Structure formats: C-alpha cells, structure tokens
Amino acid sequence: MIYRVRHTTSYTYGHPVDLAAHILHLTPRDCPGQVVLRTQLECNPAPVRRESGVDHFGNRIVWLFHEAPHSHFDIVALSDVDVHFPEPPPADSTLAWEDIAFLAAQDADVSQYLFGGPMGAPSRMVGEYVSRDFPPGRPVLEGLLALNERVYKEFRFRSGVTNLRTTPEEVLQRREGVCQDFTHLMLSGLRWLGLPARYMSGYIRTRPAAGQKRRLGADVSHAWVGVWLGPETGWIGLDPTNGIVVRDEHVILGWGRDYADISPVRGLILGGGGDVLRVGVDLVPLEEWERDPALLNLGAFPTRETA
Amino acid sequence: MNGVIPIDEMVNGQGGVRPQWRRLLSAISDLGHPELLARQQQMALALADQTGALSSSSSSGAREALESHGGSGFIGAQCDPIPLLLKADEFSRLEAGIIQRARLQEALLRDIYGERSVLADHLLPPALVWANKGFLRCGEVDALRPAEHYFISSYAVDLVREPDGQWRVLADRVRQANGLGLALENRRQMTRAIPELFAGEALQRLRSFLERWQDSVQKTGMGETANPALLTPGPSSPFWSEHVILARELGCTLVEAGDLTVREGALWLKTVRGLRKIDALLLRQNADSIDPLELEGTGSAGVSGLLDAARNGSVRLINDPRAGFVEALGVQSFLPGIASRLFGETLSLENVESLWLGQPDNRVFLEQLLFGRSQPHQDTIDYWAIASAIGEDLPAQRLATLDEKQRMLLWEKVRTEPWRYIACREPLASLSPCVGEREIVPRSIVLRMFAIQDENGWSVLPGGMCRVFESGEAITAGPIGENQPTKDVWVMVDENFSLQETSFSTPYPLAIRRSQGDLPSRAADDFFWLGRYLEQIESGARLLRVVMTHMSGTEPSPRELADIAVLMRQMRTMGLVQEAPVPAYGYAGMVRGLFAIGGSDGFFARVLRKIIRLVPELVDRLTQDVRDFISHRGSAILKMIDQRPRRTDPARMLDQLSGLTNDLLLYSATLSGFAAESMVLSGGRQFLDLGRRIERASSVLLICSGVLEQPDVYQRGRMEAALRLMLQLCDSVITYRSRYFGVVQPAPVLDLLLLDEDNPRGAAYQLAALRDSLTGLASDSPSMPEGQRSASYELADTAENIRITLAEMVESVVSASSQDTATAALPSALKDIQAAVLQLSEQIGRSYFSVLNSPRLVGIGNETAIDMDGAVT
C-alpha cells in the first residue's frame, strides 16, 4: 500500500524567539517492509543553517537553526511511502523466548534494545505483569501476542491523563493512557525479561466514520512496539493501542529506545513564551489523495516543471 | 593479601633509604620540621592567591584562620613539600605503558564509534557498550566525512604501586583529565618556596611538555593562530583552581557555557564588542551536558548546537566528548583482551583487580563475600568495594562498611542489573613520606600521570601529580578530593641521559591588539555589578554618617527631629533598613536601629559579601593587588562586623558605627583609585564605571526627591533645612560653600546637584559620563556588529535625554516666581527621572549582557499534554 503522509507542526510564540535550534525526526526511513518513494521537508521562516543526516539508530534527521527573531515556526513534512510488512511466522513455530533473549545478547546490533533509554527505568512491578505471558519455554511470538492483546483489553485509551513524565509503573496502576504509555509499558516489561524491544514512532491510518467526510489534519502521530523474533525473521511491530500486528496500515518514521530518542521535534529556543503548538497529520492512500481536491490543495510534490 | 605490607617508596625492605632519595632526605632534615610546615603554608597561600580560592570564602576570614592555626585548618589545595621521586628507568617503563594504554583507548573509541568489531567479536559485552554512560548517541551529517581527529588529545591515568612492586591502573581519565594545571603549579610553588630541595638534583623539566600542548591547542588545522577557550562549570566547581591555572598556562580564555553561542555552525564567545570566534574548546564540563540539543537529558545546560559546530570542523573539542566511554570501570577490565586483538600486544599496565558482575562466576564470588560463612581464598570483605561498571557518577561502596540489611539491599540491586556493577579490590598502595603535623609520616599515594597526543604522536609528562590519602581513607577510582593534599612528582635524569634539544616550531607572530576586546559579556556584567555594589556601599555609608551627625544630642529640637524623620525614611528608600526606626522610640531605640545596619545581617555585610563573591569570577581579569584588596580588606571589614558586641551603650555603638562608615568609605574610594590607576579601560573598568555612574545618578535623584518629600517643605525654613540636607547627603557642602558662601537657595543647590557637569557628586556628571562612555563603546569597536553599535548609540542618546530633562526641570525652578514652591513640587518628576535611569541600566544590560539568558528545551516532555493518541477504535 502506498500512502501519502503530511505532517504539519506549527508553533506560535507569544513573544518573538531570537534563537532556535531544532532536530527533527519527521522524515520516514527505509527499512524491511517499507520504501520511502519521495519525501520533502519545508519550514518557515527559512533557517540560516540546515543539515540532514542520520541519528545513532539510522533514523533520518534534519537540523534547523534560526538566528533572526520570529514569532511563528511552521514545519511541513510530506512523504510518499510504500508499506507492506510481511506476515509474521506462525506463533507456535517461533523460538522459545529464552532463546531469543540469549540470541539478542549475542547480536552486535539487536543487543542495544535490551537496555532502556532515559525514559524507562526498569521496574519489577511491570516486569511481573509482563512475565505472566512468558512461562518457561513458550514460543516468543505467542507470548508477545498474548501480551499485546492483554494490554489492549486491560487498558483504557484516554488522552490527557498522562504526560511524558508518566512512568510505566504509574500507567500500570492507572490502567489507562495513550499509545505512548502502552508502548513504554511493554518496552519496560519486555526488557525486564531480557527481551529486546524498541519504541516505534510513526503514523496509523484512520478512516472517517461511515457517512462522515474526512477532516483535514485529523490523523495523529502514533507509537507502537518493535519486537525481535530472531535473526531470520527480524523485527515486527505490535500495536498495543489497537491490539494488532503491524501490517499495512502503519507508516514508520523511525525507532529508538524510547520517546526521548525520537521525539519528532526537539529544540532549544531563546525567547518565546506563551507558545501555542498545533500539529496536524493526514495519512491517506496515495490514490485517494490524488482524487481528493481538498487534499491535493493541501500539498502535492512540486513537479519538475514547477519546482 | 592478609599480612602483606605496602611498599615504601623511600625505604627498601631492609629499612635502608633507597639511593635516589638520599640527597633529598638530607636536604629535608637540614630544613627541619617546623620550617617544612612553614613552607607548606606559604605554598598553600600562594596557590590560593593564584586562583582566588580564598576570596570565595565568606566572612569567616579564611586567610586569618589559615595563618593563626599553624599546621592544621588548611583550606583549598595544598602541596606536600616532599616530592615523589621516580627513577629514570622507572619513568621510561611507565611512559611506554601509558602510551600503549592511551593508544589502545584511542583505537577502542575509533572502533566503538565506527564498525564496533569489539562487539561483534565478543571482546566487550553489550551492556558495557549500550548502557555505558559515556557512550553518546550523536547524529551524523550525510556525506560529511568526519575530519581526521583524535578522540583523546589529553589523557591522564591514576596509578598505584602494589606490594609486588608493579604499578597498576586505578582509573583512566579522558573526559577531563584534571590535575595537569595543579601539577605545573605544584612544581612552580616548590621551586619558589623550597629551592633548597632542588639543589644538586638532576630532574626533568615540565616546560617542554606544556609547550608542546600549547602548540597543538593554539594552532588551527590551517596552521593559523587559534583562539582557544576552556569551558568550566564556574567557581562552584571543585576543580575551579585547576581550570584557572590550566587556562592561563595554555593561553585559553576561561569561559562558562553561558558565554558561548553557536551561530551559523560556528562557536562564538559573546563579548561586549560582539562575537569572537572560538576554534578550540577544552571541555572541563560533563560531556553529556555540553549540547542540550543532541544529548540525552531534559536540561538546557550547555551550548546548543556545539556538536553541529564540532562536526563541521569549525571548532575542535578537546577531548572529543564521546571519549568518556573508556572511563567506565567495566570496560577497563576487558582491555587486556582488546589489546591482544587490536594490537596483538600484551597490555603492560594492567588494572588493579576488579570483577565485572555481569559475569555469573563473579556474582557467586560476591555472594560468598557478602554472606559466605567461610571466606573463599584469602579474600576478606575488607578489601572489596562495589562501584559502577558503566561510568555512572556513584560513589564506590566499601563492603566492610555495610551492615546486614545494606548487604541484602546491595545484593538485590546487583541481582537485578548485574551488568551495572563491578567489584574492585582496594589496592594496597605504596607509601611515601609526607610532612605531618608533628613529624614526617608515611602515607598511601596515588600517582596521576599525563599524556598528550598531537600529529607527532604521544608524549608523557615527565612528572605528575601525586595524591596523598589519610591512613584508613578508601583508595578508590573516585576523582581527586577537594581538599586532598597533593605532591610534586620528580622524574630523575639518567646519568646517561643527554638533554634533548626540543625543537618546536617557533610560535606564530601575534597580531598587535591594543584593547582586550574579548571581555566576555558575563565578565562585563560582573564588573557592572561590582561598580553598582561599590557605589551602594559608598552612598549607604555617606547617608549613615549624615544620620549620625544629626544624633549628636540626646535631646533633639523639633527641627532636628523633622530632619531625622526625613533621614530615617531615606534610609528605607535606599535599602539600609526594612522599617525605619521611628524617632518616637527615643534616642536609644534609634541608635539600636542604626547599629543593626552595621551588623552581620545588615545592609553593608550583605553588599560586601556580594562584592567578595564576584572576585573568583573575575580572577583572571583583576590584578593581584586589586583582588587581594577586594577580598582581604573586604573580609577584614566583615570580620570586624561579625566580631563586634551585640549590644553596648549608645555612645560606644555610635563610635563603632562611625568607625565602620569610615572604613567602608575608604574601601570604596581605594578601589576606585585602584581601578583608575591599574585597569585597562576595555578590560572591564569601563563597565565598572558604568555601574558606578548608574548607581550614583540614581542615588542623587533619590536623595533629592526623598528630602523634598516632607510636609511644609515649601516654607522657607523647612526648605532651607532640606537643601542643606541634600548638600550634605550628596557630599557637596564644601563645593557649594566655596561658590555661594552661607546662603542656601533652591536654584544654586539644584544647579550644583543636578545640572553641573563638573560636580562628580552630582547627577549631570554621571549622565554625561554615561553618555560619553556608551558612545565610546560603540565607536572604539570596529568589530562590533552594526545592530549592537546602533543600539549603543541609542543608549548614549537616552543618557543625554535624561540629562536634558533634568536640565529643563531645573530651568523651570530658576524661572519660577517662587523657587521654594516650584522646588517643593519636584519629587514626582525626580522620581520619574530616577526610574528612567534604572531603565537605562536595564537597557545596558539587555544590550551587552542579555545574551546570558538561557534557552528552553521544547518537544521533550516540557509540554504537559502529548499531542498524540492514535486509537482507531
């Protein structure tokens, strides 16, 4: 499935910002199951300095530096991405979870996802919650799917009750939160068991309710868990917020140990105050996009002639 | 290790003095113990004066404490007069070992931040890489080949000599490699304070090593003269003295993160004349907080964009902030295997014994140590400590000090995340003679040695810094203690050793610079406030003195009472008292109220402390005379304040207060004189003056408005008294009398105090000086950016406009039909003008120091709500 995704971030500052430096994780990366066909990122006002590159995890990043006073800051990222994540192998055919833990510790790259980042301190409580799905010798994917399902069923989706400082333990106690909280919870518990897991940042396709028109900018950023099934299968995605395996309705921006590694817009600003932040995302199959005048009006890649 | 005794550096196993010590020992005994103690104090004082360390201590009068307590009560760094001796052959063995180790660390870093073959080949367990606090996850720019650079330019290593005679490594230091400055300073102080010891000793000099480092720091890749700086956390850092000394030795500007900014991918120092480019930055701040944009954490400390500037090659970071990786104790225990794989060599300088607890066998060993009934091997718990294996800033825990419950707790932590911890055997370090309070005593020592890398390879300092441990004190891999005594380290010259001609490229000729144009904004800000505080002291003391002349009789007349009421209000306005003592409380009550102003919590003590606190910040910009005067004389006054009796009879209290005001006025005046005579204008005096002028203009205006704000002041009698009071408070009585004799009228008084540009005690003089100084700042600085230049001219205009407003106001009094009535109506206009002066002060701040504001981090947890949900259902 080919999607077009448009992600707008717009800051309005109460007081002008004199100096700003930002690192953006807004450009999708190529990876098994995902090909980025084209992508562009624009910002206003224009920066005095712009660099692009990759972070430690191989995610695409853009640095922007502003040195003139400005009272608003808009970023638009537009990408066409072809996604088709293969179906995972039958769960009962996967290796026992202890074997996966052992293999991960031997792997020069995968081993890094055994260790948490700044946002997830290991917790016995979370570890015990997660370990219920991992009795000795259970095939790893069976355990993972059971856990994904359990988090989906036992936790209520509710925004506004948690924030970036909420710990997995608190989420476990509240039994509610948003995609990010469920993701951090699973990461923390899986790592407690010695299983590698990573924080996936990206988008998920939404459909307007029957008979309703699509609202522009109404999609959102999303987060889910990347888990490793051994050197042959590699990584797959589990979305605890929706209780599903990631197939062809998610687009990956990138991954890290936790949110802090891959915050979409991280910056330092001098000045400002009373800032208002607006974020809008549209994730629509390319076909649909090109037939929808409202979307076309929003953003299309410039053709060679007009560029 | 039970029953094994440590090696003594000076005495051999049979109780004989080792040959290389004989000459030194006889020189020491010639001097005698009391003399050694005296020389030791002399060095401690000299060292403290070098760095302003003493000045930072408050009213307790640290210097006096130091001088009066004989051998004890030392404050700050102290150097033991007996050096550690290293024979030439011993040094060359160490030198080879250190170079091998430093080369290995460099190669390991190259691998870790490159292909990571040590991980793929299982030479280093993943936990020690991925959970290592020194492993920094920085971004890489597309298509930018990283410039050829060293991860480690300066390296230090802590060594102990164990009972088998081998030197072993306690810790590698690459993040900051502190102590080189202290090593150089120790040597300098030793040659100065105890030249007798050096007579006839052939020892290697430290100079050529330093010159080599200077050379590599001070030139850019292009071969041009670089502008290097040393980044310090500031005077609150325990290593502040080290930073001051090292910056001076290497010719670096000493800067704090707030002094720096990154613009268009380059690093700049914010100075009062605009930005000055920095080409090399010596990091003496935690590497993980140098760039809040890219490194972990949610703080905004550091310089945002610094890593971007380093990546594109416009600034060289020394050392590379990622180098801290190799400091993790867990990594060190795997070095022998890495050396053999990467170099095919055996590691000649090994670590002291340590067991990484990520390995199951080692955990079993630890469990035995903690809970076992029979101790395995010869080990006892007494020799072991648990430390962080991954470079976390945790103090090592000595097992012997833990009770049963604490052991359980520790074991639980180790079992949960075993890879985080390492068990280290405390070394039985060698002993070396030290000057104790009553005699020469042997103490355990740790030797820190230093190496640098430049395009010609590695070189090792033929000397070092030796740390002395009290008996029983834990010898762990922790950093140097704040007040830990140190020793100079002498490397003897081999008889067969021929002095090498050190051929260093001749220094690049410096361009002539007249002004110290790179006064950092922060220093300018400090000078500005120094000026304001000094003037606050002066105007406060002057006010207090006038108040006291009005209190000469115990039975004041109604007219005197009215004056006193005005003065009391004025004291509140100027901040001398919170609540003015009401005259109705009677004479004794008022005297007590005044006496409190001169007390430990009073106005003067508070301002004096602020002044003294500024000195360490300005240590490299004030001459020693000025520094000593500010801090020593200031401390002496503070001590007097602290030591005066709480209460005594009114006459004695007034006597003491009058003594204090005299001291304070003299203090302030002397400093002004010092500044005028010995400071270069652009080196900070300009800002000191600006501060003074602002404060004085403000206080003259406050005096005039305050004194005129009293009931019935339009009446001739009251008006005359008010005008006299104004002249007294503004210290202009004599000038007035010389012009107008005894006749006091509003217009001449106002002219003298507010309009006359020649009266240094009047407001117009201050405003004219502000105008000229601000104009000068703009016009003398060709490098100043256009925006700042025009802002500076605007500030000068503002000062001039205030002066003109004042002049028009006085004109209106002169031409009024009744001068008394017109004058009585002035207070509100005067207050407006005073407010305008303070506003000008703020504008000066914004124009020259505002760059000191710190940025905010966004997008990483500072916003309360998360803008994501993503539920489909």
Image (spheres, rainbow, N blue to C red):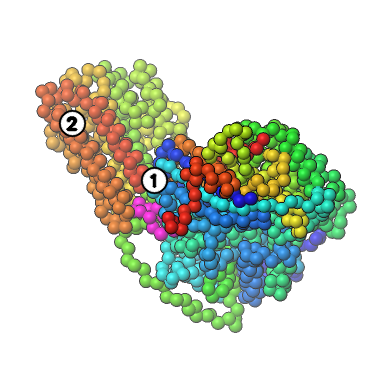
Q: Magenta includes B525? A: no
Please rate how many residues cluster around mark 2, counting C-alpha atoms within 10 Å: few if below 14, some from 14 to 19, many from 20. Answer: some
**In front of the other: label 2 or label 1?**
1
Residue at coordinates 84% horizontally, 48% vertically from top-left?
A138
Where is B147 relative to B715, above or below?
A: below
Tell me which amino acid carries mark 1: Pro
Q: Residue at x 81, y 46 (%)?
A: A142
The number of discs equals 2
Disc marking residue A194 = none
Instruction: Describe residue B783's horizontal placement relative to residue A27 as left or right.
Output: left
Percent x, y of residue B434: 63, 60
Distance from the alpha carbon under mark 2 to that under mark 1: 39 Å
What's the chain of the residue with tag 1? Answer: A
Nearer to us in this view, B375 or B537: B375
Looking at the rendered structure, whether the residues under marks 2 and 1 are on a common chain is answered as: no
Residue at image location 34% in from the left, 28% down from the top: B573
Q: Which residues lie in the magenta part?
A: B265-277
Residue that badge 1 annotates: A69
**Looking at the picture, which amino acid does disc 2 mark?**
Met
Q: Is residue B605 left or right of residue A210?
A: left
**Residue A121 in the image: above or below residue B336:** above
From the image, tell me which residue sits under label 2.
B809
Q: Is residue A23 above or below residue B311?
A: above
Q: Is residue A71 something that shows in the picture? A: yes
Above or below: residue B869 compared with residue A25: above
Residue occupying the far right of the picture: B374
Chief secondary structure of the magenta span? strand
> Tag 1's secondary structure?
loop
The quarter of the picture where the C terminus of chain B appears is top right
Quarter of the image with the N terminus of chain B in it: bottom right
